[in-house]
Image: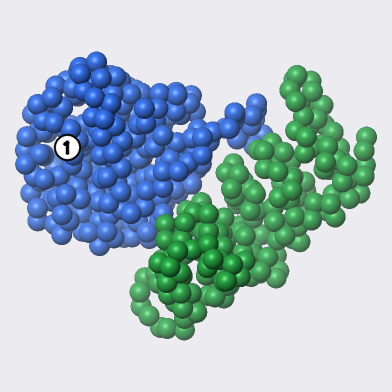
Chain colours: A green, B blue
């Protein structure tokens, strides 16, 4: 989301707050300030209450971009963040980290049962870097926890021709059927993507 | 009827409790950080707990249509263990989080010098971070503890009107009210206050600045006590508006001092079979 589109959703007070926050983020790493926590990182934590929770993901992503946050900063912000901050870090990964160095954050998020984090973890960064086994489990986890498969980036591409994923999905479906429970509709969508219909 | 439980330890409660609370009208709650029954031995153990109060627990609550906020602090009991006191240095980075609406629970347990230090330091943090403070009064030697608490608040930079004195009863309400602070009453199944005594206090004292909570945790306690007080108030002739003031508007006003309350949690969808509290694998 660009700045103009975001501003259209903010009230004047929030716009002023964001101006100041982005200016501080732009100074990240430059000033040799001895403050325990850089100012823009406090803004990163407080974004929800100043700009509204619905805009918090976009505001935080923008802050990370202006601060040119590297993998070390992203990792620290993730580990020190509340769930909403962790989510923003996950969403920013594809734009900020070209290589697989940030995979531990994705793996951490996929270990949680918080669907806000699971959903953010299965974005383009996971599509590019997650190994096949972990990726299959991530897809299965989405089906278990009710995260829509539409959130799984590159699903069509990665699922195609994945016989192992097809087997896991088929087994999961029969387990549910045996228990007299319904099979999540998204399961068939992914199974179709594999092209390995059994 | 809308209910705000201003003091409840949901970490110790089940999803059945969340469901029953929603059904009885609870739409918002505050979970103060406290002792977990088993003493902690390292600061990292606190940070995982704080993270849960800022992550997993609000997520769980939201699934049941309940807005979850928390208060964070080093509790007085563990403030006596030097292995835990480094938590005080890390607290500032937690106090800026969106879900934190006060510093708490702080106060006295055994009234030791270490507790004096932790209480004063954390009242100072509340003042610095523009947060109110949730201060409980000790279970043992309560009136002395309350008076000492009020003195420490008076010496602090925090306005008494930004302080909630909790676990009050008939013997402590007068001193607490004169201090200018908010008045919290915890309603338990057997001990401390019950709903009928609470109604008497409300009759004598009025509804101004009074908050009622269940303080439910891992001990014998009842997460529906707030509703039971509301019902007892109505039965005793209090109006719907009185009930709304004590069980919704007063806690909203007190924790609203933080500027961080977000009460618009969507009503829960019919919880999908097997996907209710997301176990991610059963
Ligand atoms: Zn408590």
Asked if A162 appears above or below A41 in the picture, the reply is: above
- Percent across and percent down for residue B158 are 17, 56
- Percent across and percent down for residue B121 are 21, 57
- Percent across and percent down for residue A87 are 57, 55
Q: Residue at x 20, y 54 (%)?
A: B123
Quarter-wise, where is residue B68 in the image?
top left
Would residue A86 be seen by someone viewing this image from the given angle?
no
Q: What is the secondary structure assignment of the residue under circle 1? A: loop
Q: Name the residue under label 1.
A: B208
The front one of A19 and A91 is A19
- Badge 1 local density, few (<14 within 10 Å), some, or many (20+)? some
Quadrant holding the C terminus of chain A = top right
Q: Which chain carries label 1?
A: B
Quarter-wise, where is residue B208 in the image?
top left
Q: Residue furthest top?
A: B235
Would residue A63 be seen by someone viewing this image from the given angle?
yes
Q: Which residue is drawn at 65% across and 38% down?
A: A145
Q: Residue at x 14, y 21 (%)?
A: B200
The answer to whether residue A191 is left or right of residue B255 is: right
The answer to whether residue A127 is left or right of residue A106 is: right
* Total marks placed: 1
The front one of A5 and B218 is A5
């Amino acid at each position: 989301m660009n700045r103009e589109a975001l501003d259209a959703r903010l009230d004047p007070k929030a716009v002023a707050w964001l101006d100041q926050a982005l200016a501080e983020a732009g100074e990240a790493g430059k000033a040799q300030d001895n403050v325990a926590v850089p100012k823009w990182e406090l803004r990163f934590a407080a974004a929800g209450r100043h700009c509204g929770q619905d805009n918090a993901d976009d505001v935080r992503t923008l802050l990370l971009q202006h601060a040119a946050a590297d993998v070390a900063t992203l990792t620290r912000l993730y580990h020190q963040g509340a769930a909403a901050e962790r989510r923003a870090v996950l969403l920013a990964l594809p734009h900020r980290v070209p290589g697989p160095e940030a995979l531990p954050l994705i793996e951490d998020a996929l270990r949680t049962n918080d669907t806000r984090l699971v959903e953010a973890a299965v974005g383009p960064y996971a599509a590019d870097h997650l190994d096949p086994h972990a990726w299959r489990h991530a897809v299965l986890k989405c089906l278990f926890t009710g995260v829509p498969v539409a959130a799984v980036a590159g699903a069509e591409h990665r699922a195609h021709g994945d016989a192992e994923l097809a087997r896991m999905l088929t087994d999961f479906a029969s387990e549910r059927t045996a228990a007299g429970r319904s099979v999540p509709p998204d399961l068939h969508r992914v199974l179709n993507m594999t092209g390995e219909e059994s | 009827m809308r209910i705000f439980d201003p003091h409840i330890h949901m970490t110790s409660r089940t999803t059945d409790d969340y469901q029953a609370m929603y059904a009885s009208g609870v739409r918002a709650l505050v979970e103060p950080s406290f002792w977990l029954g088993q003493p902690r031995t390292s600061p990292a153990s606190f940070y995982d707990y704080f993270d849960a109060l800022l992550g997993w627990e609000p997520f769980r609550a939201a699934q049941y249509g309940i807005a979850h906020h928390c208060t964070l602090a080093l509790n007085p009991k563990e403030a006596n263990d030097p292995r835990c006191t480094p938590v005080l240095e890390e607290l500032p980075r937690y106090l800026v989080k969106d879900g934190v609406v006060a510093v708490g629970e702080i106060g006295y347990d055994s009234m030791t010098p270490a507790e004096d230090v932790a209480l004063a330091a954390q009242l100072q943090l509340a003042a610095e971070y523009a947060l109110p403070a949730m201060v409980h009064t000790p279970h043992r030697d309560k009136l002395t503890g309350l008076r000492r608490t009020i003195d420490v608040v008076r010496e602090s930079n925090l306005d008494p009107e930004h302080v909630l004195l909790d676990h009050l009863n008939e013997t402590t309400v007068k001193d607490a009210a004169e201090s200018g602070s908010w008045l919290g009453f915890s309603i338990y199944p057997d001990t401390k206050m019950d709903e009928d005594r609470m109604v008497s206090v409300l009759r004598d004292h009025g509804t101004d600045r009074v908050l009622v909570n269940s303080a439910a945790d891992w001990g014998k306690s009842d997460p529906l006590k707030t509703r039971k007080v509301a019902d007892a108030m109505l039965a005793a002739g209090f109006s719907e508006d009185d009930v709304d003031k004590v069980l919704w508007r007063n806690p909203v006003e007190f924790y609203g001092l933080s500027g961080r309350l977000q009460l618009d949690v969507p009503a829960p969808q019919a919880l999908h079979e097997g996907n209710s509290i997301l176990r991610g694998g059963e």
